[in-house]
Amino acid sequence: GNSVTQMEGPVTLSEEAFLTINCTYTATGYPSLFWYVQYPGEGLQLLLKATKADDKGSNKGFEATYRKETTSFHLEKGSVQVSDSAVYFCALNTNAGKSTFGDGTTLTVKP
Amino acid sequence: ETGVTQTPRHLVMGMTNKKSLKCEQHLGHNAMYWYKQSAKKPLELMFVYSLEERVENNSVPSRFSPECPNSSHLFLHLHTLQPEDSALYLCASSQVGLAGGRSGELFFGEGSRLTVL
C-alpha cells in the first residue's frame, strides 16, 4: 500500500532561519505529491504540489521538488517567519483519488 | 469565503445526544470526504463519497452515520458517542476522474470541533 513518512516534530526555529521538513513516500504507480498546511484553529489548506518527477512546487517562499529516484518531496524555505508557525502535512494521491497523509510536523517560529 | 463550509464550528454533546455535522462545497467537485483529526494521532479517513455513492468506509463505528444527499452536501450524523470521539472533524472535497484535475488536490473546510462529555 501507499505510505508517507515525514520528519517528526516539533520543530522550533528562530525567525529568518532555514527550514527543511523531510518527506519520503512509498507508492504504486505515479502519485501526485502535496504539502498541506494547517494554521491554528483552521482546516488544512494546500501549500504546494507537484504532479510528476522533477517538478518543483512553490508557494509563499516554500519549495519542494518531486524526486522519483529518492522517493522524496522535502519542504524547504530559506527564511521562515513567525506567521509560518503551523502543522505541515506531506501527502500523496494516486489516480484512484485516495490521499495518503504523513503524520504532520509542527513548526514553531520564535521572534 | 471558503469553498468548503462546515457547521457547526464547535459542538459539545453528551453521550446520549444525537447531533449532525454539515458540510457544503461550492466548488463543483464530485467527491467528498470525512476525516477525523485527534490530538497526537494521524489524520484518519472515515468516509468517502464519489458521485454521491459511498466508496469507502474505514471501519468506522456505527455511531457515526454519513449521508450524502447530493454532490454538494455531506452530513455526519452522530449518536451515542464516547468521550474518545472528541476530535476535530474535517470535511474535504475534490474532483476525481478524467472530468477534472487529476492531481487529487483536496479542499478542506475549517472543521467542526466536537467535544463529547
Image: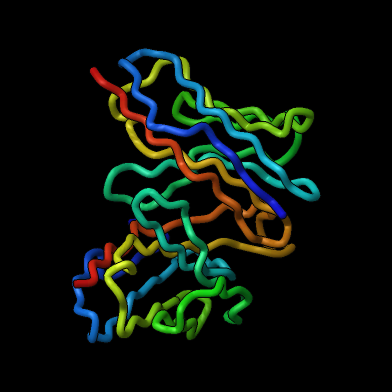
What residue is shown at x 65% (from left), y 28% (from top)?
Answer: A65
Residue A41 picture location, percent across and down:
27, 49
Residue B7 vs residue B112, the one in the foreground: B112
Q: In this view, does B29 lie to the left or right of A106?
A: right
User: Which image quadrant is residue A11 in?
Assistant: top left
What residue is shown at x 50% (from left), y 69% (from top)?
Answer: B46
Q: In this view, does A96 lie to the left or right of B79?
A: right
Quarter of the rendering occupied by the N terminus of chain B? bottom left
Residue A22 picture location, percent across and down:
56, 28
User: Which image quadrant is residue B82 in?
Assistant: bottom left
Residue B106 picture location, percent across and down:
53, 55
Residue B47 vs residue B110, the one in the foreground: B47
Colour setup of the view: rainbow
Quarter of the rendering occupied by the C terminus of chain B? bottom left
Q: In this view, does B42 lie to the left or right of A71?
A: left
How many labels were placed on the picture? 0
Query: Relative to B16, does residue A103 appear above or below in the rendering?
Result: above
Query: Relative to B117, does residue A80 appear above or below in the rendering?
Result: above
Residue A103 vs residue A50, the one in the foreground: A103
What residue is shown at x 38% (from left), y 31% (from top)?
Answer: A10
Residue B73 picture location, percent across and down:
44, 77
Query: Relative to A89, does residue B67 appear above or below in the rendering?
Result: below
What residue is shown at x 76% (from left), y 33% (from top)?
Answer: A68
